[in-house]
Amino acid sequence: MKDTARLLFYFAGTLLVGALLAPVLFWAAQSPSAHRMLPMLSRFDFETYFHRALLISALLLLWPLLRALQVRGWRDLGLEKNRRKTQDVLAGFLIAAIPLLCCGAALVLLQIYSLRPAILWGKLGTVVFASAFVPLIEELLFRGLILGVLLRSNSRIAAMVLTSALFAVLHFLKAPDQTTPASDVNWASGFVSIANAFWQFRDPMLLAAGFTTLFVIAWILADARLKTCSLWLPIGLHAGWIFANGAFSRAAHREHLVLPWIGKDLMVGIAPLIVAVASWALMNGWLNYVRSRQT
């Protein structure tokens, strides 16, 4: 229980530091010098900077947490060296991306989405960047550190449930867009975002469409980590989902909101949930194939 308590203090500290850091990031991005160097920064609202501030604070507080947990290496978290890391990353990427893109194609045929007149090529760089770095950071934190620590004092199932629920909650928490207009940003704005972040939990339709899908995705990533004793397969899966979702949104736009089947993007709804389960089956088939080749 001591490890769990330390993790709770870590997340409380992440929220506090992130809430205080968010206005600083926002004001820095809105400064005249930032406009000259990176004019695109001015297009993002405060909520975007709030979520980036949470990520930065999580990284800043990671070292003190590792010291408190007495984690000295990967083996303390149940991770081992993976000789097939490139193979696992590529397999995971394809297993996640291809079914999700096929789902997107089906939605276009059903006229729930329609193809854009022109693909937003200029925004694909953001998708590639997110696909490369977000999985690395989040897998190290959730499936690497948090799951590894919880496994030290909990059963395998309990650790997976807790990690997956935490992942789903943190990704589901999001204040409504334009909660804090640019002209009203102040030192308390980050705390206002935290207070407004739970609004989606009041909507049963959004809860069924979004939270459930996120939980299952997190469970699949945890299962991949435990079955390979490595983070490379979950990193590949995570990257594939982010890339396919982002690339599809640059090539098509939603015509209808069909909750709970399809939400705001390809990662929200019962249909994406079914696709994720299909990817899970493909992942297990891949792992069985790899094991058969090794015997």
Image: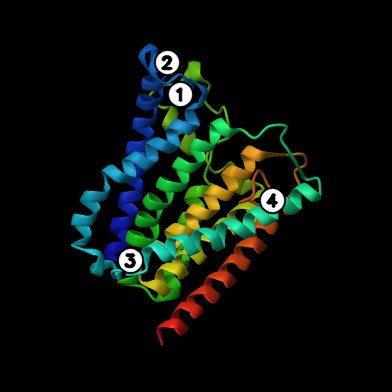
Task: Tell whether label 1 touches label 2 (CB within 8 Å).
Answer: yes
**Residue placed under numbered mark 3 in the picture:** 148
Dot placed on the residue nearer the N-terminal end, 3 or 4: 4
Label 4 is placed on what type of residue? Answer: Gly
Dot placed on the residue nearer the N-terminal end, 3 or 2: 2
Label 3 is placed on what type of residue? Answer: Gly
**Residue placed under numbered mark 4 in the picture:** 104
Between 110 and 56, the one nearer to me in the picture = 110
Q: CA distance from mark 2 to mark 4?
A: 36 Å
Q: Residues within 10 Å of mark 2 (few under 14, many from 20)?
A: some
Q: Residues within 10 Å of mark 4 (few under 14, many from 20)?
A: many
Hey, which quadrant is residue 144 in on the image? bottom left
Q: Residues within 10 Å of mark 3 (few under 14, many from 20)?
A: many
Q: Image check: 186 left or right of 201?
A: left
| Res. 215 in view | no
Q: Nearer the viewer, mark 3 or mark 2?
A: 2
Dot placed on the residue nearer the N-terminal end, 4 or 1: 1
Rendering coords of residue 4 (x, y %): 32, 62
Q: Quadrant of the N terminus?
A: bottom left
Label 2 is placed on what type of residue? Answer: His
Determine the secondary structure under disc 4.
helix
| Res. 3 in view | yes
Residue 108: assigned label: none
**Residue placed under numbered mark 2 in the picture:** 35
Residue 41: assigned label: 1
Q: CA distance from mark 3 to mark 4?
A: 34 Å
Q: Image check: 171 left or right of 71?
A: right
Rendering coords of residue 205 (x, y %): 70, 51
Q: Nearer the viewer, mark 2 or mark 4?
A: 4
Task: Tell whether label 4 touches label 3 (CB within 8 Å).
Answer: no
